[in-house]
Image (tube, helix red, strand yellow):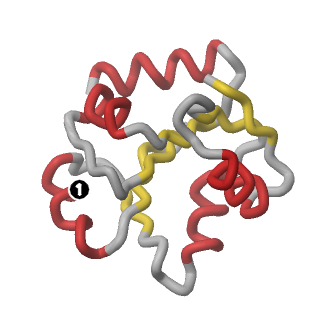
Amino acid sequence: MIRLRGFQKFLTQNKINAAYLTAPITHRYLTGYSDIDSRMMMTPHGLFVITDARSAEQVSRAIPDAKIIDPTHPDFKEKFRAAVNSRRIGIEAEHLTIAGRDRLQKLLPKVSLVPI
């Protein structure tokens, strides 16, 4: 998890409270795990993996410290907002689609999304 700590340091140095990670290659680099259907949110409170029940067990084995948020769960929006609790979120601008960025901004309207 040395890479995760280094990434958290990068976020802090750049005054970014959290990072929404969408590229599987980034997931693999930081954690050793990747799934094309998963997203990750790195916050000062830890790593959250946004994935449904099909991948939850694999994520738990691969990244034991990660917290899982199921986007199909009725409480998803509330759990996601509580996990983020940030004002500035870094996004992988070259990987996140415009539609994905718009959905994230709609979900977190008071948050500034900044490219990392």
1 to 83, vertically: above or below: above
- Residue in front for this viewpoint, 18 or 55: 55
Residue 92 is situated, as x and y percent measured from the top left of the image, at 56, 32
In which quadrant of the rendered view does residue 60 lie?
A: bottom left
107 to 92, vertically: above or below: below
Q: Is residue 21 left or right of residue 102?
A: left
Q: Amino acid at mark 1?
A: Val
Residue at 57%, 69% in the rendered image: 79
Residue 47 is situated, as x and y percent measured from the top left of the image, at 42, 45
80 to 95, vertically: above or below: below
Residue 4 is situated, as x and y percent measured from the top left of the image, at 37, 27
Residue at 74%, 38% in the rendered image: 113
Which secondary structure, mark 1? helix
- Residue in front for this viewpoint, 3 or 100: 100
Q: How many marks overall?
A: 1
- The quarter in which the N terminus is drawn is top left
Q: Is residue 102 left or right of residue 62?
A: right
Residue 105 is situated, as x and y percent measured from the top left of the image, at 76, 53
Q: Which residue is mark 1?
A: 59
Label 1 environment density (alpha carbons within 10 Å; few <14, some 14–19, many ≥20)? many
Residue at 80%, 46% in the rendered image: 111
Furthest residue toward bottom: 74
- The quarter in which the C terminus is drawn is top right
100 to 5, vertically: above or below: below
Furthest residue toward front: 98
Q: Is residue 92 left or right of residue 28?
A: right
